[in-house]
Amino acid sequence: MSWSRNASDFSRIGLSALEGANAIGANDLIPLDQPMSEEQLRQRAKLIGTILEMRKRVQTLRDRADALNGALESFRDRQDQIQRRA
């Protein structure tokens, strides 16, 4: 399996995990106007922290993909220029 295929699979897994975390957050969290125990507050904070970290990682993957696509386009353009000169 090529590295680009691996990156694509990893990003898809990351996005599905993020979507799952958002779904859990929307459906299962106690509303903020209700009292919560210390453990519930810790769990909420941990879930929010996980979601924020996942978003950060997904954005990093997107940024890397954009940079690699730009480099690939430049490489192909340069190849075309070299072939036209030959």
Image (tube, grey):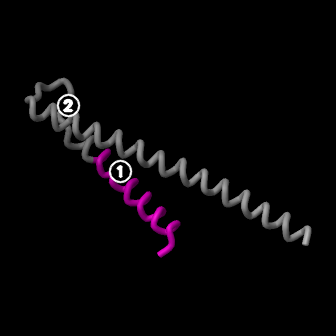
Quick check: is 10 in the magenta stretch? yes
Binning the other alpha carbons within 10 Å of mark 2 as few (below 14), some (14 to 19) or many (20 upward) gives few
Please tell me which residue is depicted at 50% across the width and 68% down the height of the picture.
Answer: 3
Rendered location of residue 86, percent (x, y): 90, 72
> 65 or 17, which lies in front?
65
69 sits left or right of 58 in the view: right
Q: Residue at x 51, y 72 (%)?
A: 2
The residue lying at 11 percent from left, 28 percent from top is 36
Q: Position of residue 77 (x, y in %)?
A: 78, 61
Residue at x-position 17% and y-position 38%: 43
The amino acid on which the numbered mark 1 sits, given as a three-letter code, is Glu
Secondary structure beneath disc 2? loop
Q: Quadrant of residue 46?
A: top left
- The range drawn in magenta is 1-23
58 vs 11: above or below: above
Tell which circle, 1 or 2, labels the residue nearer the N-terminal end.
Answer: 1
Residue at the far bottom: name it: 1
- Residue furthest right as drawn: 85
Residue 68 higher or lower than 29, as above or below: below
Q: Is residue 49 above or below residue 75?
A: above
Q: Which residue is mark 1?
A: 19
